[in-house]
Image (cartoon, rainbow, N blue to C red):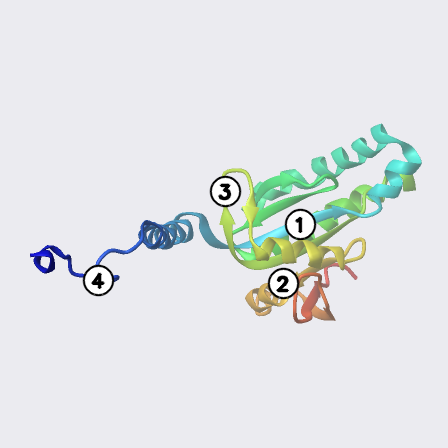
Amino acid sequence: NPMNDSKKPEDPKSKAPDNIVKMDDLLRRREEIDSELESKFSRRMAIFFTDIVGSTPFYEAHGDIAGRLLIQKHNDLVFPLMKEFGGEVIKTTGDGMLAAFDSCAAAVKAAVRMQEVVKAYNGEKNDKDQVHIRIGMNYGRSLVDVNDIYGDVVNTCARITACANGEQIVMSETVYKEVKRDEGIYVRFLASEKLKGKSQPVKIYHVLWCD
């Protein structure tokens, strides 16, 4: 009987298309990967940028070799101080460095010591041979790779550093909240800045490190 040979219509829910199954599987794997990245590579830290003030016009006025010597002076002055305060140089940035600290207080104290060392060095040099740096700090959770640090905390720190003048040490509000009760660290509100990539103005504070 032809009626007996006919097949019942297949329930559309009984078999999902291959692309749906694969998508579900990938989404589950994405959750697992995100969780693993968070647990293994993400941690809270103080991010720390130094930047040599006036390096670009210095290169133009004095040439590449003199410019490279300026950067070397910066490195020789500030790199040795990192270990003393428990910091780690992550990488150089052309005319400065990116570093990380587990403690905001240690980062601030390292920054003050760096400015003191640079100031003492400049006191014995003519204008051409002096080094002037600005330092910016931020605090939060970042992704830590073998040779680099990633995330919004790092990007914001770079923007904050660019707001500083020579000899200044500036920080985000997250750093300020961590150190405001620390004896020996003196911080004042500086400004609210509209930073590139940020929807709201960012409060910036600066360290009073010299008279």
Q: Quadrant of residue 199?
A: bottom right
Give, as a three-letter code, the residue at label 2. Gly
Figure check: 201 above or below 50: below
Secondary structure at badge 3 equals: loop
Q: Are marks 1 and 3 in contact (CB under 8 Å)?
A: no
2 or 1: tag closer to the N-terminus = 1
Q: Residue at x 62, y 39 (%)?
A: 91
3 or 2: tag closer to the N-terminus = 3
Give, as a three-letter code, the residue at label 1. Phe
How far apart marks 4 and 1 lie (CA) works out to: 61 Å
* Total numbered circles: 4
- Judging by the rendered image, the residue that carries numbered circle 1 is 49
How far apart marks 2 and 4 lie (CA) works out to: 74 Å
- Judging by the rendered image, the residue that carries numbered circle 4 is 11
Q: Are marks 4 and 1 in contact (CB under 8 Å)?
A: no
2 or 4: tag closer to the N-terminus = 4
- Judging by the rendered image, the residue that carries numbered circle 2 is 184
Secondary structure at badge 1 equals: strand
Percent position (x, y) of residue 150? Answer: 56, 49
Percent position (x, y) of residue 61? Answer: 93, 37
How far apart marks 1 and 3 lie (CA) works out to: 17 Å
4 or 3: tag closer to the N-terminus = 4
- Judging by the rendered image, the residue that carries numbered circle 3 is 145
Residue 128: numbered disc: none
Secondary structure at badge 2 equals: loop
